[in-house]
């Protein structure tokens, strides 16, 4: 057994860990946790070990005692690069293990880096223009009707992560009165926002996104959630655990609005990698019974040429669904899950 000394919040703690790392190079690791006065989010200096080749490059381990749980996201910064990772396990030392070496431009198998979490979005109130200039990720919530449990639109990968998805979400929200909008916008100078900021929809943790957490803590579950996403190729893929009749109506509307026979518009199956059919996907768990999610995946061509057309199709379908008078809302909602 070797002993690691960690200085946390000014108090020295000694933790026991089994065996040395990398032939004993890090039998003793010292880390300091600071708190920035503007956000109170912990900044921890850690040793990064790139020694988990079988792990997805979006996952990592984190040290114990930082207030970060399995499933949360963290920001890891090395030199001039920063990337988001999802925590898969907690370790009893100040060493972070990951396989995402290229995402941080790490030149070797072990370096010293800075870890921040569980909040990972920029907590300063900056505009989208500032976020783009600073290569940051920001969170946005438009919730003018805090009692709304009908319709929410989300774009978890807006900005330059999945181009135009935030524009689509904003367009739909502006058109459908009483709806709620949540999105993140990530940017990176010179390209690479997807590489640095993307968190898969099955892994998004409310603890890491304060505005999303506020929605969760309001104990609201929405009748319907529509999520706009990007994929590399394949036209348009409509997934999620929402009702089949809604997906079919949306498929028909998208085909009509795009009016391009070369663009396939199809319903997702379990064989599709971006099917949105997991109960862990944010598009589903934000809805009543987990059965109201509609995920729209679009390739680059669709998002470049037809992003407005797809948004207009969504407006057509869901404006009809949620335009009924409030007095009849409960009766209307009760039949949404019949299929």
Image (spheres, rainbow, N blue to C red):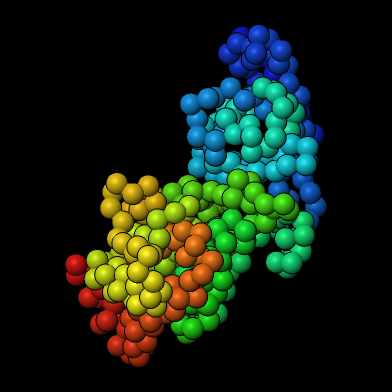
User: If the image is split into quadrants, where does the C terminus sit?
Assistant: bottom left
Q: Is residue 56 left or right of residue 332?
A: right
- Residue 9: x and y, percent? 76, 37
The residue at the point 51 percent across, 65 percent down is 303
The residue at the point 44 percent across, 49 percent down is 202
Residue 311 seen in render: no
User: If the image is split into quadrants, where does the N terminus sit?
Assistant: top right
- Looking at the picture, tell me which residue is in the foreground, 319 or 67: 319
Against 31, residue 145 (above or below) is below
The residue at the point 78 percent across, 42 percent down is 80
Residue 90 seen in render: yes
Q: Total number of numbered labels?
A: 0
- Residue 55: x and y, percent? 50, 30
Occupied quadrant, residue 212: bottom right
The residue at the point 26 percent across, 70 percent down is 248
- Residue 199: x and y, percent? 53, 48
Occupied quadrant, residue 182: bottom right
Residue at the far front in the pictured view: 262
Against 127, residue 268 (above or below) is above
Q: Is residue 256 left or right of residue 54?
A: left
Residue at the far left in the pictured view: 339
- Looking at the picture, tell me which residue is in the foreground, 154 or 257: 257
- Residue 222: x and y, percent? 39, 69
- Looking at the picture, tell me which residue is in the foreground, 25 or 187: 187
Against 203, residue 333 (above or below) is below
- Looking at the picture, tell me which residue is in the foreground, 92 or 172: 172
């Amino acid at each position: 057994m070797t002993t690691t000394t960690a200085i946390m919040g000014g108090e020295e703690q000694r933790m026991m860990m089994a065996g040395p790392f990398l032939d004993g190079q890090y039998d003793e690791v010292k880390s300091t946790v600071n708190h920035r006065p503007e956000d109170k989010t912990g900044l921890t200096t850690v040793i990064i070990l790139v020694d988990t080749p079988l792990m997805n490059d979006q996952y990592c381990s984190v040290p114990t005692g930082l207030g970060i749980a399995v499933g949360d996201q963290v920001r890891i910064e090395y030199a001039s690069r920063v990337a988001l990772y999802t925590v898969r396990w907690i370790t009893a030392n100040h060493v972070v293990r990951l396989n995402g070496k290229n995402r941080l431009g790490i030149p070797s198998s072990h370096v010293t880096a800075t870890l921040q979490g569980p909040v990972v979005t920029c907590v300063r109130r900056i505009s989208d223009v500032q976020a783009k200039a600073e290569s940051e990720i920001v969170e946005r919530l438009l919730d003018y009707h805090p009692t709304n449990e009908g319709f929410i639109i989300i774009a978890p990968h807006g900005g330059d992560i999945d181009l135009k998805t935030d524009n689509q979400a904003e367009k739909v929200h502006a058109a459908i009165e009483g709806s709620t909008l949540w999105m993140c916008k990530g940017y990176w100078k010179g390209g690479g926002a997807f590489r640095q900021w993307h968190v898969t929809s099955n892994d998004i943790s409310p603890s890491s996104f304060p505005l999303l957490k506020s929605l969760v803590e309001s104990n609201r579950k929405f009748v319907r959630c529509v999520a706009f996403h990007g994929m590399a190729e394949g036209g348009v893929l409509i997934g999620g655990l929402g009702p089949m009749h809604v997906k079919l109506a949306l498929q028909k509307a998208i085909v009509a609005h795009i009016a391009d026979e070369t663009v396939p518009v199809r319903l997702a199956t379990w064989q599709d990698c971006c099917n949105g059919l997991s109960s862990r996907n944010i598009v589903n768990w934000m809805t009543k019974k987990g059965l109201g999610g509609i995920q729209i995946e679009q390739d680059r061509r669709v998002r470049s040429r037809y992003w407005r057309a797809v948004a207009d199709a969504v407006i057509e379908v869901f404006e009809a669904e949620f335009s009924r008078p409030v007095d009849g809302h409960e009766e209307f909602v009760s039949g949404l899950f019949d299929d």
